Image: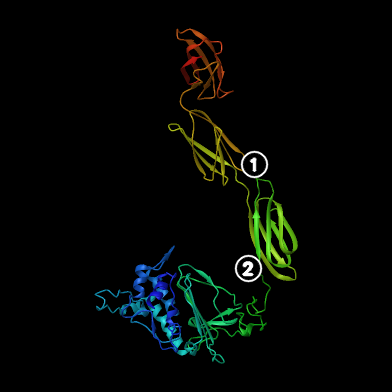
C-alpha cells in the first residue's frame, strides 16, 4: 500500500486508491491480512514527499512542515480501518532517510533527535491517539465499514458502524481527510443528525443538524467524528441536553430544536439563511443623472420591511414575496436594512455603493522626432480614439498613435456622450508645406502655427507675380489662388511670425 498512500501524501490523487488497506478488499474472509504504509523494502513516504511533493500556489508538499502535517492525515486513513496493521520503525516521526542511503540494505541513521522536533512529535502524538482509540473502542473491530478513498480531488472518507453497540457506546464513526492541495468544502457521510464528537480533540461536540451539512477541510487536514464521546479521552463539553451551546443550568428553553440559533438564555431566535438576500445595484449612467437603482431578491417568501437610507434620503417600504427594487437614485452610499413582519427582533443590514462615471481625463505627449503621440486616459473601461478619420477602440489606459506630417486631428471619447470628448489639433514637422505640387488653380499651405503670414510668388527671373496674406487662424490649410498665372516654375516665399520659408511649385 506504499504507492497509493504516498500518492495521497504527495498530493497526486488522480490514481490514489487506498482501499487495499482493507482485508475485505484483499478478499479475506476475516481480518487476518496485515496492512502497512511503509516496510523494509519500500521507499519512505516522507522522503518522497520532500523530493517529489506536489504544490498549488504557496502550498507546497516539499516544505518540511507541510509534508509532516500530511502524515497525520495518512495515519487517520490507516489506523481507523479495521484489521491488523504494521508500523515501520520511526515512521511515527516522519523518518525521511532514503532506503538507498548507504546501499539498499545498508545501515540507516537512528534519529532519536526527531522526537524533540515539535512537528515530528505531532505525528507521534496523533498516531498514538489513533492507536489508543482503535484498541480501546470496540467499533474498530467491526466488519460493517465502507471506504470512499479514490476521489481525484483528494477527499477520502471512512465510515464505521457497530450494530452491537449499546447505551453510550460508539456505534458510528466518520473519518474524512483532504489530501488535495487547496481547501475543499465537503459533505461528510454522517449516519444520523444530532450531536457528534471529535474524540481526538477532547470529545469536542459537533452538532449535525442536517445530513446535507457541509464543512471545510484545509489541505492535509483530517477529522474524526463519533456519535458518542469516548471515555478514553477527556470530555470538556458543558452539560447541554439540547445541544444549543447554552449550559443546562442557564438554559430557560431546554428543548430547543437541533441546529436552531439561540440567545444567551438558550431560546430560539428567528434567523434567515445567510444567502437569503441577494442585492444587485446599478450606478448612475452619467454624472447627476439620478438614475441609479438597487434590486433585491430573496430565497424565502415572507412579508418583509425594508429601509433605505443615505445622507439625503430615507425610504421605508414593505413587500411580500421574493423581489423588491428602488430606482431614480443618485450616486452615493446607501444602508439597506430588512425586517420581517411578526419578528420584531430580526434585522439584517447591508451597505450598497452606487457609483457614477468619472470625468474623461486625457493627456498627450508628442515625440517630435518620431511623430508618435502617446495618450494617457482615465475615466472609462473603453476608449474610442479617432485620428485623421481613422477610429480605434481600446480598453488600455495608454495608447500610441503614429501621426502624419502636417496637421493631425485627434479625438478621444467613451461610449457615454455625457463624459464629453477630448479634441486636439497637432502639427508634426518643423517647416511649412505646400500641396498639391504640381498645382492647377490653388496651392494649399500647411503652417506649423496658427498665424497670419504674407506670401510672394516670383517667376524664375525674380519677377514678383503675385502677393497677399493668408490667415492660418481661420483655416489650418489656407489657400493661394494661382489660377491666373501662366504654366511654369515659380518660387513661393512665406513670411510670418517665427516663420520664413520658400517653396518651388509647378503651375500646370
Which corner quadrant holds the N terminus? bottom left
> Compared with residue 80, is residue 506 higher up or lower down, i.e. above or below?
above
Q: Can you give x and y, in whole percent of width and height, for residue 364 in the image?
A: 51, 37
Q: Can you give x and y, in whole percent of width and height, for residue 86 in the image?
A: 37, 84
Picture quadrant where residue 40 is located: bottom left
> Compared with residue 240, is residue 6 higher up or lower down, i.e. above or below?
above
Badge 1 or badge 2: first in the primary sequence:
2
Secondary structure under tag 2 reads loop
Picture quadrant where residue 85 is located: bottom left
| Residue density around tag 2, few if under 14, some if 14–19, many if 20 or more, within 10 Å | few
| Residue density around tag 1, few if under 14, some if 14–19, many if 20 or more, within 10 Å | some
Q: Can you give x and y, in whole percent of width and height, for residue 386 in the image?
A: 56, 36
| Way the structure is coloured | rainbow
Q: Is residue 111 left or right of residue 280?
A: left
Q: Which residue is mark 2?
A: 274
Question: Tag on residue 464?
Answer: none
Q: Which residue is mark 1?
A: 418
Secondary structure under tag 1 reads helix
Amino acid at each position: 500500500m506504499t504507492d497509493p498512500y504516498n500518492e495521497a501524501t504527495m498530493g497526486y490523487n488522480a490514481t490514489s486508491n487506498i482501499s487495499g488497506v482493507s482485508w475485505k478488499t484483499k478478499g479475506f474472509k476475516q481480518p487476518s491480512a496485515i496492512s502497512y504504509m511503509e516496510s523494509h523494502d519500500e521507499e519512505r513516504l516522507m522522503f518522497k514527499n520532500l523530493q517529489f511533493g506536489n504544490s498549488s500556489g504557496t502550498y507546497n508538499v516539499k516544505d518540511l512542515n507541510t509534508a509532516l502535517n500530511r502524515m497525520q492525515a495518512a495515519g487517520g486513513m490507516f489506523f481507523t480501518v479495521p484489521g491488523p496493521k504494521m508500523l515501520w520503525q520511526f515512521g511515527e516521526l516522519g523518518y525521511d532517510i532514503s532506503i538507498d542511503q548507504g546501499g539498499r540494505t545498508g545501515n540507516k541513521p537512528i534519529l532519536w533527535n526527531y522526537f524533540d522536533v515539535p512537528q515530528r512529535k505531532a505525528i507521534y502524538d496523533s498516531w498514538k491517539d489513533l492507536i489508543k482509540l482503535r484498541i480501546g473502542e470496540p467499533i474498530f473491530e467491526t466488519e460493517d465499514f465502507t471506504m470512499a478513498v479514490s476521489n481525484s480531488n483528494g477527499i477520502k472518507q471512512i465510515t464505521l458502524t457497530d450494530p452491537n453497540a449499546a447505551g453510550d457506546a460508539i456505534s458510528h464513526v466518520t473519518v474524512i481527510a483532504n489530501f488535495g492541495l487547496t481547501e475543499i468544502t465537503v459533505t461528510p457521510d454522517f449516519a444520523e443528525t444530532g450531536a457528534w464528537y471529535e474524540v481526538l480533540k477532547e470529545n469536542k461536540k459537533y452538532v449535525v443538524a442536517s445530513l446535507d451539512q457541509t464543512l471545510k477541510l484545509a489541505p492535509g487536514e483530517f477529522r474524526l467524528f463519533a456519535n458518542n464521546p469516548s471515555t478514553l479521552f477527556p470530555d470538556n463539553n458543558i452539560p447541554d441536553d439540547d445541544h444549543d451551546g447554552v449550559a443546562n443550568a442557564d438554559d430557560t428553553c431546554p428543548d430547543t430544536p437541533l441546529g436552531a440559533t439561540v440567545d444567551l438564555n438558550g431560546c430560539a431566535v428567528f434567523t434567515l439563511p445567510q444567502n437569503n438576500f441577494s442585492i444587485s445595484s446599478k450606478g448612475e449612467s452619467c454624472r447627476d443623472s439620478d438614475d441609479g437603482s438597487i434590486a433585491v431578491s430573496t430565497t424565502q417568501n415572507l412579508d418583509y420591511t425594508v429601509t433605505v437610507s443615505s445622507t439625503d434620503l430615507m425610504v421605508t417600504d414593505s413587500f411580500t414575496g421574493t423581489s423588491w427594487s428602488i430606482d431614480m437614485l443618485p450616486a452615493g452610499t446607501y444602508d439597506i436594512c430588512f425586517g420581517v413582519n411578526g419578528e420584531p427582533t430580526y434585522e439584517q443590514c447591508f451597505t450598497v455603493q452606487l457609483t457614477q462615471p468619472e470625468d474623461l481625463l486625457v493627456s498627450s505627449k508628442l515625440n517630435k522626432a518620431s511623430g508618435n503621440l502617446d495618450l494617457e486616459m482615465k475615466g472609462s473601461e473603453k476608449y474610442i480614439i479617432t485620428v485623421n478619420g481613422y477610429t480605434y477602440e481600446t480598453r488600455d489606459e495608454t495608447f500610441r498613435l503614429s501621426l502624419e506630417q502636417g496637421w493631425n486631428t485627434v479625438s478621444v471619447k467613451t461610449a457615454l456622450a455625457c463624459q464629453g470628448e477630448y479634441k486636439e489639433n497637432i502639427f508634426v514637422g518643423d517647416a511649412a508645406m505646400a500641396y498639391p505640387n504640381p498645382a492647377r488653380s490653388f496651392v494649399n499651405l500647411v503652417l506649423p502655427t496658427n498665424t497670419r503670414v504674407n506670401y510672394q510668388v516670383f517667376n524664375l527671373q525674380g519677377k514678383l507675380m503675385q502677393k497677399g496674406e493668408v490667415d492660418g487662424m481661420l483655416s489650418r490649410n489656407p489657400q493661394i489662388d494661382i489660377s491666373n498665372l501662366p504654366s511654369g516654375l515659380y518660387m513661393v516665399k512665406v513670411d510670418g511670425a517665427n516663420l520664413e520659408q520658400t517653396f518651388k511649385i509647378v503651375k500646370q
